[in-house]
Image (cartoon, helix red, strand yellow):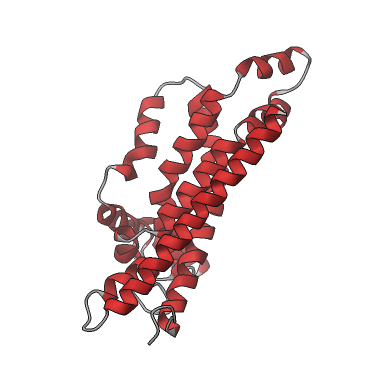
């Protein structure tokens, strides 16, 4: 088979990875922006603890995160059992489990990038708007949020790339089921474990590099456009 011709299983793994990464970013973004704003602008008891909990997935082994998700959202988990008994929703070992694992692993990167952008924003503009009678929400949506757009874009790209490459938490919580939960990293891992799988592994590796590089280049272009617009 040609090096650049994907098999149906490989194509499905690529599609699922892109789907999971996009859903991961969409699910993470609203909470990530709000939490980054809270951590940047507010001082309250337990702030350091909250900050530590948010960034905990960065230092914990991904398999630990996957196991914690399994015992929490699995069919017999604390939350998962309630979801299944009440609404008939089962998350573990489905593509939704891959999204949940990616959200948890990518969330700290998103929050950190957005928080740094909020920290760098000129707060004197917010204060001036308040003195002119603008309410807190109007200030947030018309001044604070637009100033943080470059950081939000960076956070989205980091979250997308992290979700695209997620392995440990996904294989623990979602398993490695071809056509259902097998993402690009899991398919690549499978190819390295079978005889004559080098060509397929190389194809998937090239695709992963190309998609990640395209995301980074796109993010740089968007950041420059937004920065130029804000500066102008």
Residue pictured at 50% horizontal, 72% vertical:
15
Residue pictured at 61% horizontal, 37% vertical:
149
Tell me the quarter of the picture where residue 231 sits.
Answer: top right
Residue pictured at 28% horizontal, 70% vertical:
189
Viewer-proximal residue among 202 and 60: 202
Farthest residue, direction top: 131
Farthest residue, direction right: 132
Looking at the rendered image, the quarter that the N terminus falls into is bottom left
Looking at the rendered image, the quarter that the C terminus falls into is top right
- Residue 25 vs 224, above or below: the answer is below
**Looking at the picture, how far across and down is residue 163, in whole percent?**
43, 56
Residue 75 seen in the current view: no
- Residue 159 vs 177, above or below: the answer is above
**Looking at the picture, how far across and down is residue 44, in whole percent?**
46, 21
- Residue 229 vs 101, above or below: the answer is above
Tell me the quarter of the picture where residue 230 sits.
Answer: top right
In the image, taking residue 2 as reference, residue 155 lies left or right, namely right
**Looking at the picture, how far across and down is residue 162, in whole percent?**
41, 53
Residue 210 seen in the current view: yes
């Amino acid at each position: 088979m040609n090096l650049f011709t994907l098999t149906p299983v490989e194509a499905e793994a690529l599609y699922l990875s892109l789907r999971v990464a996009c859903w991961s970013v969409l699910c993470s973004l609203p909470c990530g922006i709000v939490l980054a704003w809270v951590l940047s602008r507010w001082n309250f008891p337990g702030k350091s603890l909250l900050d530590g909990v948010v960034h905990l997935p960065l230092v914990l082994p991904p398999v630990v995160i996957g196991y914690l998700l399994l015992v929490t959202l699995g069919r017999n988990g604390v939350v998962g059992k309630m979801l299944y008994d009440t609404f008939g929703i089962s998350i573990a070992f489905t593509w939704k489990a891959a999204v949940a694992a990616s959200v948890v692993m990518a969330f700290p990167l998103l929050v950190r990038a957005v928080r740094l952008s909020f920290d760098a924003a000129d707060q004197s503009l917010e204060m001036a708007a308040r003195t002119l009678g603008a309410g807190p929400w109007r200030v947030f949506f018309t001044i604070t949020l637009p100033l943080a757009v470059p950081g939000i874009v960076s956070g989205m790209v980091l979250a997308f790339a992290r979700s695209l490459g997620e392995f440990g938490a996904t294989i623990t919580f979602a398993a490695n089921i071809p056509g259902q939960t097998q993402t690009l990293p899991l398919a690549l891992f499978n190819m390295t474990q079978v005889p004559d799988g080098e060509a397929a592994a190389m194809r998937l590796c090239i695709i992963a590099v190309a998609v990640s590089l395209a995301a980074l280049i796109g993010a740089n272009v968007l950041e420059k456009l937004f920065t130029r617009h804000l500066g102008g």
